[in-house]
Amino acid sequence: MHIVRVVFILLEVLILFNLLIVVHELGHFLAARWRGLYIEKFGVWFGKPLWKKTINGVQYSLGSLPFGGFVALPQLAPMDIIEGKADVDRARLPKISALDKIIVAIAGPLFSLLLALFFAGIVWAVGHPVSEADSTTVIGYVLPDSPAQKVGLQPGDKILSVDGKPVRRFMGMNDSVSWDVVRSEGDKIAVKFERDGKVQTVWVEPYKAETRGWRRKSVRQLLIYPAETPIIDKVEPNTPAASAGLRSGDIIRGFDKTPIYNPIALLEYISKHPKDQLVLQVERGGERFDVPVKPTLLPTNGEQKPRIGIQWDTTGIVSIDHPNPIEQVYNSVTSTLKTIGAVASPKSDVKLQHLSGPVGIGRIYYLLFQSERGWQLALWFSVILNVNLAILNMLPIPVLDGGHIVLAIIESIRRRPVNMRVLEVVQTSCAVVIIGYMLYITFFDVQDLPFVRKKLDQFESQSSTKKTP
């Protein structure tokens, strides 16, 4: 049954991911039809065709590699390295105006934006699941001896701004604590927070973990976690929790009269006090009561560790938000532009290797679809991805749509087309660089796949053990 579910999720990922690319290419196709350009091919997927047919002079095909699609427009620019060698002599095709080239080039990003608005409309109607980490700026847990703890930050503190930028959530790409920490550039980060009604500011020196092996370089962290309601998902039989009468759905509000804002806090206390009985403050059905419980050694990841025998609900309390489509697209635009700005800044920790290619995007979709509200989350992410696709394609780089537009503008200024031989060299060179970058980013994306990461962790652990005298 598990295999069937995995296959079904992979099919969902392929359908949605390919839809994004095909709609983008469809924009170019329809614009080319409108402007009277010669369309040589329109293909869904790449590689050796599984099916192809010529209709009204256009060869339609279904490739063997399920990664997007393409439209071959010989009059627009030579793209042989990506689309295959043209079957016609470009020199014999009628010339097209610079305006035609601009319209056809911009149609792809335009269709991506329209698809983003379409998805955003669906999200507006059905709702976007929002976790507590995406809706709070309250600190739930501070790692011992972390930079945050050293300057006095505590669980329960409400963060108001990071690095001078107001924050509205803990996680995410817009106005979030984590993202503003990552893209900060100073030696220390100003963190403004509220505690007991008083606003304070501390300067925190960010932590950067040692980069292991060939993995992505580590980025800045404060080693703090968001407040998440500690809800019991499952009580394991024949354990202290079961004997104490704890149930699935119970909320642990504190222990020994100490409030907890994140399940990690209870786990840490039990690890440090394995033989001590503690009194849990439990909420059930709106009522609160105390439950005494004493940890015992239980098997955990192949080791005996002090535990009470509960599993946490990792989703916490989820609310449903209904953001309007314009707001969604606007937030996606700003997050994309902020990412580009961070990558472009030499002082930022965010580099090209931290972006995701098809493998990384597929992994994100797979994780989203595993959720009970998978389609809602996937559609919301698709809004971001479509906007991202539109903006990145508008960058003034040959091969990309923005490059075609720049070349068309140069052509209109010079009043004659760019030399075909020069254009072929520039397009091919840029295509090689982009393909090389995609392979480079895929190298890092593959390392993030769960089964690969597990193997790498085991290998690095063994290597570390061998080096230890």
Image (tube, rainbow, N blue to C red):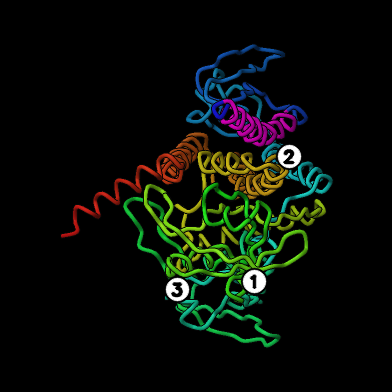
Q: Residue furthest left?
A: 469
**Amino acid type, residue under disc 3 in the picture:** Pro
Identified at 65% across, 76% down, the residue is 158
- Dot in front, 2 or 1: 1
| Helix, strand or loop under label 3 | loop
Work out how far the residue at label 2 is from the one at label 3, CA to CA, in angstroms: 49 Å
**Amino acid type, residue under disc 2 in the picture:** Phe
**Mark 2 or mark 3: whose residue is earlier in sequence:** 2
Q: Residue 144 — which label? A: 3
Secondary structure mostly seen in the magenta stretch: helix
- Front-most of residues 175 and 283: 283
Rendered image quadrant of residue 36: top right
Residue corresponding to mark 1: 138
Q: Residue 217 — which label? A: none
Work out how far the residue at label 3 is from the one at label 1, CA to CA, in angstroms: 17 Å
Asked whether residue 11 is in view, the answer is yes
Rendered image quadrant of residue 193: bottom right
Q: Which residues are magenta?
A: 4-32
Q: Residue 111 — which label? A: 2
